[in-house]
Amino acid sequence: MARFTRFNAVSLALGMAFLYLPIVLLIIFSFNESRLVTVWGGFSTKWYVELFRNQQLLDAARVSILVGLTTACIATVLGTLAAVALTRTARLPGRSLFTAMTYAPLVMPEVITGLSLLLLFVALGIDRGFWTITIAHTTFALCFVAVVVQSRLAAFDMSIEEAAQDLGAPPWKAFLLVTLPAIAPAVAAGWLLAFTLSLDDLVIASFTSGPGSTTLPMKIFSAVRLGVSPDINAACTILIGIVAVGVVAATFATGYRTRRAG
Amino acid sequence: MADRLRSIAVALPPYIWLLAFFLAPFIIVLRMSFSESVIAQPPYSPTFDISQGLSGLWESVKEFSTFNYTFLAEDSLYWRAYLSSVRIAAISTVITLLIGFPMAYAMARAPLRWRPLLLALVILPFWTSFLIRVYAWIGILKRDGLLNQLLMSLGVITEPLTILNTEPAVFIGIVYAYLPFMVLPLYASLERQDPALLEAASDLGSPPWLAFWQITVRLAVPGILAGCLLVFIPAVGEFVIPNLLGGSSTLMIGQTLWDEFFSNRDWPLASAVAVILVLVLVVPITIFQRAQSRTTG
């Protein structure tokens, strides 16, 4: 009855082509000899060489990676705690407010999040820079971590942790030694998600950054507004490459873990 | 009791973080939206005066000015921006649904061993930079871009089409960037359906299209709703896509807020624009949040 028809195959193939063609074209044209971005002038890696001479771009990349790593670590801890609180405590005081605050940032338009955080930093008299960007990124990234970890935690059999406690393990130890390894793939995925979200963010970083803390997307955005150019294509290709390696590594890690566990 | 204290202790760090960096900033935006901007002064000075306690708070409430809101209500530019954002987001959401549904349906019908791969393929673009994916379309859509080159070499058109910096380019950008957000919840709800229901319908004499409409689509309504909200809500406030692909001809509220903030430096007015944008989105966000906590919590 539920057969995979030709119509299914065609709609899937067209959809995938739509998703991937722009990225593939961008990668191809980053190796273009010609300065004209849409005319093929032969294979060349000269734009990559040019890129690595661009000190401003390298500085921005360094800021982005540092912000991303810090964000990912703080957001993973806070997000995992939030997920535990959401799945296990039905009678938390102010639970509905807590739930609302964990889900709202997932869909809140970035311009609003950015604007409101900037006004907070100004009201508190905090100088904008590395830490304000990191705090801003952590705020929305922790919500994504919470959702990812929560779905895994909901499927986890609580009786195993209870058994550990019955055998004399203190609750924190039972959680660390029994539950945490079981939800580790979700925690790892959450960390990676937080890192890429931070690495990717333009709008919130633009509101919360200060002089001397320009992130890579901000740099790329200001370059892109002047027009398409092959060195930007090259920078984008490197970013895509880093993310692809990370995702493949994470997939293998989770695959390995689940195989070993099953 | 110890359990209760422990669970509160677990919830406390993220709770306090979100109160401080998500809720408190909104209250400041709200306060700021009632301030008047003063020319030749840092435009951000009047916020809450907490140092004088409650009476100071009341004094600052009395100083509330609805100037910004009156200004927004009287200037038709802002109304047009709100309306056109909602319209563009709604049209894009419908197109995303029309493309995403057949994809999700095909994935749910695909052989079991293909499904993890197909799922990974849909999620993967989400991991690559949003900015880069939107930027990639400039090279495709511009006048001497790849799409026009292709169409002209195929003989479909003789003159290059102007797509970049028009509204259709914004539709393409939004549909493209948010397609995974539509496909994933749709797939989740379609995959869960029992094929036996369709067999039962056909045994009872229902033609396939009717069974599809009455069973497959009806049962997928929660997924359709979730997908549509996940596309619609962020699309209304979208800034990057209209800025890069829409050019000056498209008017969207995210862009207006950005300009008010960075170009005109009128922070109180930008705050008022943000407050109204939140009000516009409160209903869809509430529906989304209810649906989320029902399915996962």
Image (spheres, coloured by chain):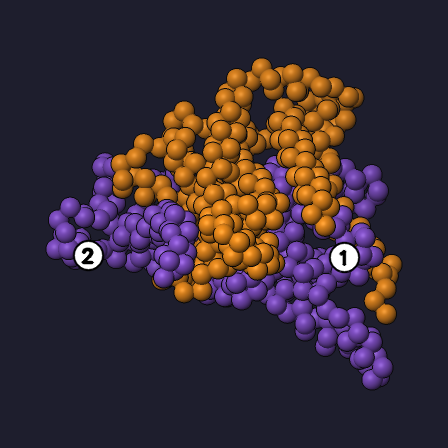
Chain colours: A orange, B purple
Q: Position of residue B281 (x, y in %)?
A: 46, 60
Count of marks overlaid on the render: 2
- Taking depth in this image into account, of B70 and A233 the one nearest to the observer is A233
Q: Which residue was labeled with disc 2?
A: B61
Please report the residue visible at 68 percent of the width from the left and 73 percent of the height from the top. Answer: B218
Kindly identify the residue that appears in the image at 27 percent across and 52 percent down: B31
Q: Earlier in the sequence, mark 1 or mark 2?
A: 2
* Nearer-the-camera pick, A223 or B166: A223
Badge 1 density bin: few <14, some 14–19, many ≥20, Cα 10 Å: many
Q: Residue at x 59, y 42 (%)?
A: A188
> Is any atom of residue A153 visible in this view?
yes
Residue B86 horizontal/vertical position (percent):
51, 59
Q: Amino acid at mark 1?
A: Met
Which quadrant would residue B46 be assigned to in this image?
A: top left
**Could you tell me which chain the residue with mark 1 belongs to?**
B
Q: Which mark is residue B107?
A: 1
Q: Chain letter of disc 2? A: B
Label at residue B264:
none
Label 2 crowd (10 A; few <14 / some 14-19 / many >=20): few
Side (left or right) of B25 relative to A260: left
Q: Is residue B185 above or below residue A217?
A: below
- Quarter of the image for residue B210 reads bottom right
Q: The residue tagged with tag 2: helix, strand or loop? A: helix
Amino acid identity at mark 2: Val
Do the residues marked 1 and 2 share a common chain? yes
Q: Secondary structure at mark 1?
A: helix
